[in-house]
Image (cartoon, rainbow, N blue to C red):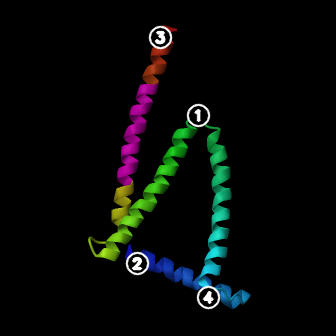
Amino acid sequence: MKEIVLAMADAVNEIHDILIDIFGFHMTDKELHFWIIGVIGMFTFLVVYFFFKWIARMKWSITILSFIYTFTGMVVLVFAIELQQAITNRGNMEFADAVAGLWGFVVLFMIYAVVGLIIYGFRKWMNKKRG
């Protein structure tokens, strides 16, 4: 996990150096963050916007969107926990721990989804039987 964070930091530093070399941009860290994060954020927003508009047309759209939102929050949470472990030296910072935590959420969500589908199917069957 620590190696992944360091590799990402190296990649960001390389991009910073390339921007300076190619375009001659001499920006402060705050200016660089403003533009790079701003552009990445707008690109991500547009992709997510059109993806969510597509999902909104589906039957289970609220459930799908709730899962995506929750999963995104869980990704942030597990990586925050792993970073906290690295900073405080209380536990090992490992990518496998983050993956295991996310799998826990996915498995429990799948159990929820299966139970929900069984109940939904049963109700539909009962309504069909009555009517």
Which residue in the protein does label 3 denote?
A: 129
Residue situated in front as seen by the camera: 66 or 1: 66
Q: Say which label, 3 or 4, has the lower sequence index.
A: 4
Element marked by disc 3: helix
* Residue 80, image quadrant: bottom left
Check if mark 1's residue and mark 3's residue have beta carbons within 8 Å: no
Mark 1 closeness class: few <14, some 14–19, many ≥20 residues within 10 Å: few
Q: Residues within 10 Å of mark 2 (few under 14, many from 20)?
A: few
Cα–Cα gap, marks 3 and 2: 59 Å
Residue 3 versus residue 75: which sits nearer the camera?
75
Where's residue 59, x and y in %? 59, 34
Which callout, 4 or 2, points to the residue nearer the camera?
A: 4
Q: Secondary structure at mark 4?
A: helix
Task: Kindly identify the amino acid type of the residue bearing the numbered disc 4.
Answer: Asp
C-alpha gap between disc 2 and disc 1: 42 Å
Bounds of the magenta segment: 103-120
Q: Which corner quadrant of the image does residue 34 belong to?
A: bottom right
Q: Find residue 119 and report its horizontal and vertical position in percent.
A: 41, 26
Sequence-wise, which precedes: disc 1 or disc 4?
A: 4
Q: Is residue 128 visible?
A: yes
Residue 102's spot in the image, x, y percent?
A: 39, 56
Locate residue 70 relative to residue 91 in the image: left or right: right
The earlier-in-sequence mark between 2 and 1 is: 2
**In the rendered image, which residue does mark 4 sit on?**
17
* Disc 1 target residue: 59
The residue to which callout 2 is attached is 3
